[in-house]
Image (cartoon, grey):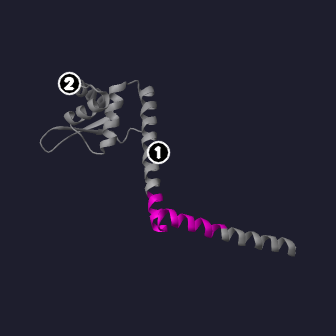
């Protein structure tokens, strides 16, 4: 039993030595533990953001298959989700055009009307009376 305890103590001492070496290497590479922590927080934020966009894209793709709607509708929903605030038809058209390379205000307005009927988006009136669209939060894609 004493041999097992001694072995465990030796292992703990060895582990403590390894931790000190790792800490020295990290300090040498990053300058300080605070810098390393900040870099790790930034990396965690980036990974989280990428994960949420991947999840959104997957949800939209699945919804497109289940709801039987196409590329323009998917781009409209992605645009509204990315914006995080209600957008008018011109703003949506501009963003969809930037993504797809082509978009017409007339087609976007028509698609938004159909999507509103399917309760995929909701429309509110803005301060100046313009139509503002946002994803329907009741819809769980």
Q: Which residue appears farthest toward the front when viewing the image? A: 28
Dot 1 falls on a residue whose secondary structure is helix
User: In the rendered image of this protein, does residue 1 appear above or below residue 86?
Assistant: below
Q: Is residue 28 magenta?
A: yes
**Residue drawn at x 23%, y 31% as measured from the top left:** 93
Please name the residue that numbered disc 1 is placed on.
Answer: 51
Percent across and percent down for residue 31 are 47, 66
Q: In the picture, residue 107 is in which quadrant?
A: top left
135 magenta-colored: no
Q: Nearer the viewer, residue 12 or 30?
A: 30
Magenta part mainly helix, strand or loop? helix
Q: Is residue 8 left or right of residue 84?
A: right
The residue furthest bottom is 2
Q: Please tell me which of labels 1 and 2 falls first in the chain.
A: 1
Q: Residue at x 29, y 40 (%)?
A: 134
The magenta stretch is 18-41
- Mark 1 touches mark 2? (CB < 8 Å): no
The x, y position of residue 105, in whole percent, is 20, 27
Given residues 134 and 138, the one toward you in this image is 134
Which quadrant of the structure image shows residue 10?
A: bottom right
User: Does residue 8 lie above or below 58 as drawn?
Assistant: below
The picture places residue 58, in percent across and down from the top left corner, at 46, 35
Q: Residues within 10 Å of mark 1 (few under 14, many from 20)?
A: few
Q: Nearer the viewer, mark 1 or mark 2?
A: 1
Residue at image mark 2: 106
Instruction: Give the CA separation, mark 1 to mark 2.
Output: 34 Å
* As drawn, 21 above or below 138: below
Q: Quadrant of the C terminus?
A: top left
């Amino acid at each position: 039993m004493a041999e097992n305890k001694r072995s465990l103590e030796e292992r703990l001492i060895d582990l403590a030595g390894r931790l000190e070496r790792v800490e020295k290497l990290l300090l040498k590479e990053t300058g300080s533990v605070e810098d390393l922590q900040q870099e790790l927080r930034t990396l965690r934020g980036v990974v989280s953001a990428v994960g949420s966009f991947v999840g959104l894209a997957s949800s939209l793709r699945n919804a497109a298959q289940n709801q039987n709607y196409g590329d323009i509708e998917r781009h409209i929903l992605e645009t509204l989700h990315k914006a995080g605030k209600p957008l008018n038809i011109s703003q949506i058209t501009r963003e969809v055009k930037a993504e797809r390379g082509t978009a017409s205000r007339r087609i976007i307005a028509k698609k938004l009307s159909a999507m509103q009927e399917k309760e995929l988006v909701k429309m509110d009136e803005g301060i100046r009376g313009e139509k503002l669209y946002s994803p329907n939060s009741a819809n769980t894609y």
